[in-house]
Amino acid sequence: MRNIFAKELTAHATDNDRIVMLSGDIGNRLFDDFKKVAPNRFYNCGVAEANMIGMAAGMAMMGFHPVTYTITPFTTIRCLEQIRIDLCYHNLPVVIVGTGSGLSYAELGPTHHSCDDMGVLRILPNMTILSPCDPIEVKLALKAALEHDGPVYLRLGKKGEPALHREPPVFAIGKAITLRPGNDVCILGTGPVLAEALTAAKMLENECVSTRIESVHTVKPLDTALLGEIFNTFKLVVTLEEHSLIGGLGGGVAEWLADNSGYSGRLLRFGTADRFFEEIGTQEYAREVFGLTAEHIFAGIRNALQ
């Protein structure tokens, strides 16, 4: 994901001299090509992420379109006041990019985990949250973010995430994309963990359960038209995210469902528990602990249907 992001940002910066890149002491080699085409528009802000957001706000007020980039918890939780006041209050066109989101950096401990970032930023007025599921959606989401007139949080994985789309789909902020058609169960997922949903869907198919999968790449604003259709059509609707059950996609869908009566669909949520992951292990191990693997998703849906 981060490689395609760097490549696409460089391409955009080649054609748009308003794009400025600010890095929080990370990705220097990753942006070598960017620095070749725009040497005066790359700033390594060091381990001073709050300052980086403030710089981005000032540049946006001067007519530039800044993009900030560093590891997710350092560009969200550490900078919350600056994001809230400098960016959201003034509704400035700054793209905040968090890399290694969710449990991508599971081996580095809780300081590098980000299972609360969407929940924290989702409550801020004017904030748009994009969480693409694969490198193809990263390319499309970045373009949409750069065209958006307001602050955008772009939530990325790390590297090596597989392509889940066979070809580039139509991408619009606030409109989910169908990854897989189905008639019995619908999974609303966000981010790279959707790969697990696709595997679970194949397992369910072996038990004659037809599973529709939607990539909800925009966590804010939610695709409420889709939610109305889904909860009118399916008896079981599932949300899946590598984020806390509190505040993220599942929380947002639950809030919408609470505010909109008359739907027959039941909601089942998969996400991380309300606790820190204090063990050290791979992302795959962390997903196993939190029940975010295809096997756990399959078992949970099968039990809910029974």
Image (cartoon, helix red, strand yellow):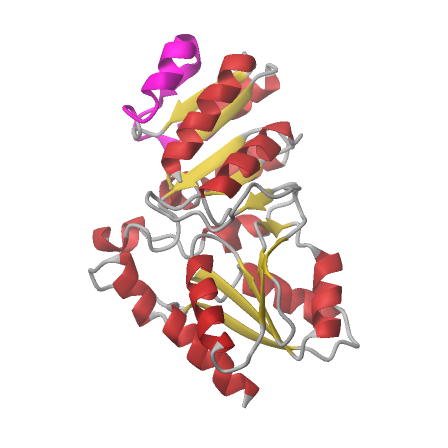
Among the 4 quarters of the image, the one containing residue 179: bottom right
Which residue occupies 52% across, 55% down? 190
Magenta run includes residue 270: no
Among the 4 quarters of the image, the one containing residue 293: bottom left
Among the 4 quarters of the image, the one containing residue 18: top right
**Quarter holding the C terminus?**
bottom right
Magenta run includes residue 50: yes
Q: Is residue 100 above or below residue 252?
A: above
Which residue occupies 64% across, 28% down? 147
| Residue projecting furthest to the top | 40
Which is more toward the observer, 273 or 177? Answer: 177
| Residue projecting furthest to the bottom | 306
Which residue occupies 39% across, 18% down? 34
Res. 23 in view: yes
Q: Which residues are magenta?
A: 28-55
Residue 128 placed where, x, y %?
A: 61, 43
| Residue projecting furthest to the right | 262
Residue 252 placed where, x, y %?
A: 61, 61
